[in-house]
Amino acid sequence: SQQGEEDPQALSIQEGENATMNCSYKTSINNLQWYRQNSGRGLVHLILIRSNEREKHSGRLRVTLDTSKKSSSLLITASRAADTASYFCATDSKRFGAGTRLTVKP
Amino acid sequence: DSGVTQTPKHLITATGQRVTLRCSPRSGDLSVYWYQQSLDQGLQFLIQYYNGEERAKGNILERFSAQQFPDLHSELNLSSLELGDSALYFCASSVVPGAYEQYFGPGTRLTVT
């Protein structure tokens, strides 16, 4: 079974808006990672947050981690059409969720 | 370009057949992971190797096997293929197992007819 579960399954927004995706997991973790996948391509690592961290930033990305709730969120600010992709969370490197399909309309 | 190479890019074969997928990790990476992604599905972790040794096993069927060779490249063998095995198979590598990012290859698209 998958460890990470993303929510929502699909998200459609206008360019310039912010996109928030959530990830829940079941067991304790050492780290959580977010990846991006363009259609049919390999995944690209976005950001890693360790279990002792609560928030991390990378460019327009902001990731939070709440280990008490076993959840994480990925915020993409000022979205662009090029951000259209599927986004996955993964716990301890190997357990991926089903992903959130983000569509950013120009 | 992640530095991870996978061959072949596409593979079409018939049910009951056996195929081998090949992966060369990024230079310097010792750990290799294999994943299966069916249409509109998330990634299913299959198996992980580290420096030639099996490190972790996921949802890998008994019909599937893998190995990592001394030069660190890895092969995934799929046998007695079924229609449901049609999927994208990704290889990823990392420096060491654990809290390090993985670099994904472009995948092999397997179609079983």
Image (spheres, coloured by chain):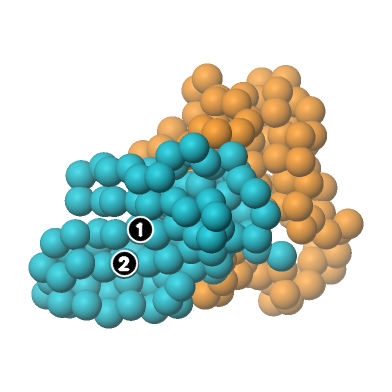
Chain colours: A cyan, B orange
Rounded to the nearest angstrom, the CA distance separating label 2 from label 1 is 6 Å
Residue type (three-letter) at the residue carrying disc 1:
Leu
Q: Are marks 2 and 1 in contact (CB under 8 Å)?
A: yes
Residue at 35%, 58% (x, y): give it: A74
Q: Which mark is residue B103?
A: none
Residue type (three-letter) at the residue carrying disc 2:
Thr
Q: Is residue B106 visible?
A: no
Q: Is B72 drawn above or below residue B112 in the view shown?
A: above
Q: Chain of mark 2?
A: A
Residue at 29%, 59% (x, y): give it: A75
Image coords of residue A8 (percent x, y): 42, 76
- Quadrant of residue B88 within the rendered picture: bottom right
- Quadrant of residue B18 within the rendered picture: bottom right
Question: Residue A90 versus residue B54: which sits nearer the camera?
Answer: A90
Q: Chain of mark 1?
A: A
- Which image quarter is the C terminus of chain A in? bottom left
Q: Which mark is residue A20?
A: 2
Residue at 14%, 62% (x, y): give it: A78
Q: Which residue, given by chain and number where applicable, does mark 1 sit on?
A: A74
- Which image quarter is the N terminus of chain A in? bottom right
Image coords of residue B74 (percent x, y): 68, 35
Q: Is residue A75 visible?
A: yes
Q: Is residue B65 rendered to the left or right of residue A26? A: right
Q: Is residue B60 rendered to the left or right of residue A11? A: right
